[in-house]
């Protein structure tokens, strides 16, 4: 009797344990992850029978059978399920997978098409089926799914954006563009998303197709978003003139305040297309009037662009400068000299000092601005630094160092303070106080400003190379004095001092530096061919010296921005980052090289 009770207990325990195992999805998952598909199939089969609506268990059961290549067993299960649920489209997809694994593409295609044909016409069902096809890289079937879904929902553009994404994956750019435009027509809120997709996936040559399709759309319907996208496409191609035409039309049609045009003008100015920038700013000033929020900024920016057009161009005449000078003075006469017009005063002073060569007037303008009540502290700092530069150019070294020191003290941990400290250290270098100057440059090598850090590093290395090895500072003193003359635009005197240096110290290591400074003088004189010849001489004769990478980079910039030889510029930029990979110019050279090559920049 006891033996029977014990046997029954053991049997009951075993059955309970087996039932627990059968109902343990964690164990089934573990078997599946470990590749034990036989055990996984057994457990998932039981779990699926117990919970017929649980798709996860059923799908894992089918995957296990597929991995075991038990196709007949799987088909039996599928047929049984389809009898109970003939409209469950996901079963047809699974059936298609079974045929596909058996290398029966036609039978698989038939099942996939059944899934699409039996799909219900609601958004969730369509996107679910399409996503299933996408996950399996069946993009054509996903396209068919979205197209049929649009028909069922009686909305031809309901899935246009999804179709655009699919055609992008398929590499069918023209269809991609068409679908994204249809999506934009259906939902104006998609403009930013469409622009992002276009910017990411369109190549340079694809913008022509985009513009062709946009022109067709604009003829068919008046949709401001299409005009906006068309103007945007011109900006992507740096065709600011065409973009200006479209934005102006849009501004007039919608009665806007000129914000689009102001932004376009800023982009055109950054790209040095000053004619378009000036036209856009002038449009705002003329058409919108003084009460417009962009009026005052546009008026100032237009003058700044006119100044840059002259000073950054290949050539300008005294007449050009007089016209620009008159515009600045007319503006200040109309609006007065105040804290609101401080930027205009600073620009006019720069024009007088660097281009009109009227230093007394430049100094007078900034002296007046410096004591103006209520001037913003950063504007005051900029005024003092520029004023110090002008005093240095006029030979008043004491006033110059005093102003630099004031800004350094007031902005000790800020970038503008570091700029003042650098200029003060450079002034000491000009005056021959090399050890103090080098100590300051060594500190400024860690500046947050890349430009200041690079310049400080250059001068620190220069002093170390040319002072520490000599018993006398005579040679470097001649050179630093010539550099100060260049800063003061005393070019002929600088040439004379460099000739003295070359004659008195023919074996000195400064020979490459002499050529470098002479090249910079010719750049200032806008004799770019002579500057290039001198830079090339440095590269040829002194490839291992510290000026070689500077010379290469400067040469590349001249070919790019002044001599309009982009191919030569690209070659030189490449040489900088390959032959001088440790140069402070290597990163910028690589960026410029990629930009000239036409790479998309992030």
Image (spheres, helix red, strand yellow):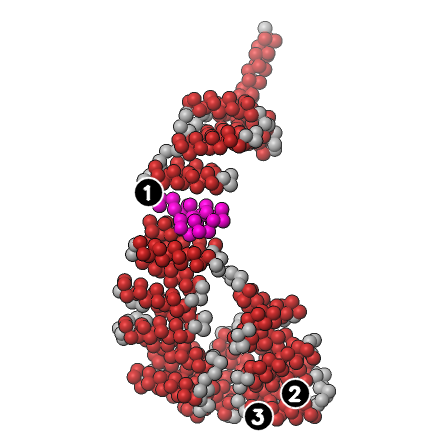
Give the alpha-carbon distance from disc 1 to disc 3, as whole Å.
77 Å
Q: Quadrant of residue 197?
A: bottom left
The residue depicted at 33 percent of the width and 83 percent of the height is 331
Q: Position of residue 299 (x, y in %)?
A: 34, 77
User: Could you say which disc has been placed on residue 492 in the image?
Assistant: 3
Q: Is residue 388 magenta?
A: no
Mark 3 vs mark 2, foreground winner is 3
Mark 1 vs mark 3, foreground winner is 1
Q: Which residue is mark 1?
A: 155
The residue depicted at 33 percent of the width and 42 percent of the height is 155
Q: Is residue 173 magenta?
A: yes
Give the alpha-carbon distance from disc 3 to disc 2, as whole Å.
19 Å
Mark 1 surroundings: few (<14), some (14-19) or many (≥20) residues within 10 A: few
Mark 3 surroundings: few (<14), some (14-19) or many (≥20) residues within 10 A: few
> In the picture provided, is 112 more to the left or to the right than 568?
left
Q: Quadrant of residue 249?
A: bottom left
Q: Position of residue 408 (x, y in %)?
A: 50, 80
Position above or below: 186 against 120:
below
Q: Quadrant of the N terminus?
A: top right
Label 1: which secondary element: loop
- The answer to which of 469 and 223 lies nearer the viewer is 223
Range covered by the magenta-colored residues: 156-180
Between disc 1 and disc 2, whose residue precedes? 1
Label 3: which secondary element: helix
Position above or below: 564 against 520:
above
Between disc 1 and disc 3, whose residue precedes? 1
Mark 1 vs mark 2, foreground winner is 1
Q: Which residue is mark 2?
A: 476
């Amino acid at each position: 009797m006891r033996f029977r009770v014990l046997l029954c207990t053991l049997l009951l325990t075993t059955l309970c344990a087996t039932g627990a195992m059968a109902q343990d999805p964690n164990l089934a998952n573990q078997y599946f992850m470990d590749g034990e598909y036989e055990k996984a199939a057994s457990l998932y089969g039981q779990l699926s029978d117990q919970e017929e609506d649980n798709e996860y268990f059923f799908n894992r059961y089918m995957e296990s059978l597929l991995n075991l290549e038990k196709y007949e067993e799987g088909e039996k299960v599928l047929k049984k399920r389809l009898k109970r649920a003939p409209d469950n489209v996901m079963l047809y997809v699974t059936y298609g997978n079974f045929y596909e694994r058996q290398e029966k593409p036609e039978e698989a295609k038939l099942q996939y098409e059944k899934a699409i044909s039996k799909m219900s016409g609601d958004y969730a069902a369509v996107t679910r089926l399409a996503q299933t096809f996408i996950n399996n890289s069946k993009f054509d079937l996903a396209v068919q799914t979205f197209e049929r879904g649009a028909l069922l929902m009686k909305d031809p553009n309901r899935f246009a954006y999804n179709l655009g994404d699919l055609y992008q994956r398929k590499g069918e750019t023209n269809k991609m563009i068409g679908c994204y435009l249809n999506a934009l027509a259906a939902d104006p809120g998609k403009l930013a998303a469409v622009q992002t997709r276009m910017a990411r996936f369109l190549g340079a040559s694809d913008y022509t197709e985009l513009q062709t399709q946009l022109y067709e759309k604009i003829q068919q319907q008046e949709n401001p978003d299409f005009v906006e996208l068309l103007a945007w496409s011109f900006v992507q191609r740096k065709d600011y003139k065409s973009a200006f035409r479209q934005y102006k039309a849009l501004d007039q049609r919608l009665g806007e305040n000129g914000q689009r045009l102001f932004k376009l003008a800023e982009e055109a100015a950054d790209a040095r297309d000053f004619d378009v920038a000036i036209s856009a700013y002038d449009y705002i000033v003329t058409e919108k009037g003084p009460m417009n929020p962009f009026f005052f900024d546009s008026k100032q920016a237009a003058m700044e662009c006119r100044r840059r057009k002259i000073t950054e161009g290949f050539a300008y005449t005294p007449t050009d400068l007089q016209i620009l000078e008159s515009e600045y003075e007319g503006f200040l006469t109309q609006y007065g000299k105040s804290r609101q017009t401080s930027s205009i005063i600073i620009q006019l002073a720069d024009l007088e000092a660097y281009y009109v060569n009227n230093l007394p007037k430049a100094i007078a303008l900034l002296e007046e601005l410096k004591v103006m009540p209520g001037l913003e502290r950063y504007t005051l700092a900029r005024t003092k630094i520029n004023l110090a530069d002008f005093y240095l150019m006029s030979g008043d070294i004491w006033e110059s160092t005093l102003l630099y020191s004031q800004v350094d003290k007031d902005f000790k941990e800020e970038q503008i303070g570091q700029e003042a400290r650098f200029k003060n250290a450079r002034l000491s270098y000009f005056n021959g106080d090399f050890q103090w100057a080098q100590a300051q440059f060594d500190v400024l090598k860690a500046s947050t400003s890349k430009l200041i850090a690079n310049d400080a590093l250059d001068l620190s290395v220069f002093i170390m190379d040319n002072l520490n090895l000599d018993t006398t500072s005579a040679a470097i003193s001649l050179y630093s004095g010539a550099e100060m003359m260049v800063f003061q635009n005393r070019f002929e005197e600088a040439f004379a001092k460099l000739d003295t240096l070359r004659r008195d110290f023919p074996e000195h290591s400064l020979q490459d530096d002499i050529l470098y400074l002479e090249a910079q003088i010719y750049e200032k004189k806008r004799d770019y061919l002579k500057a290039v010849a001198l830079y090339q001489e440095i590269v040829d004769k002194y490839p291992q010296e510290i000026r070689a990478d500077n010379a290469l980079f400067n040469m590349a910039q001249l070919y790019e921005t002044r001599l309009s030889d982009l191919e030569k510029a690209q070659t030189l930029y490449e040489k900088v980052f390959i032959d001088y990979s440790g140069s402070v110019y290597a990163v910028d050279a690589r960026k410029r090289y990629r930009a000239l090559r036409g790479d998309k920049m992030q």
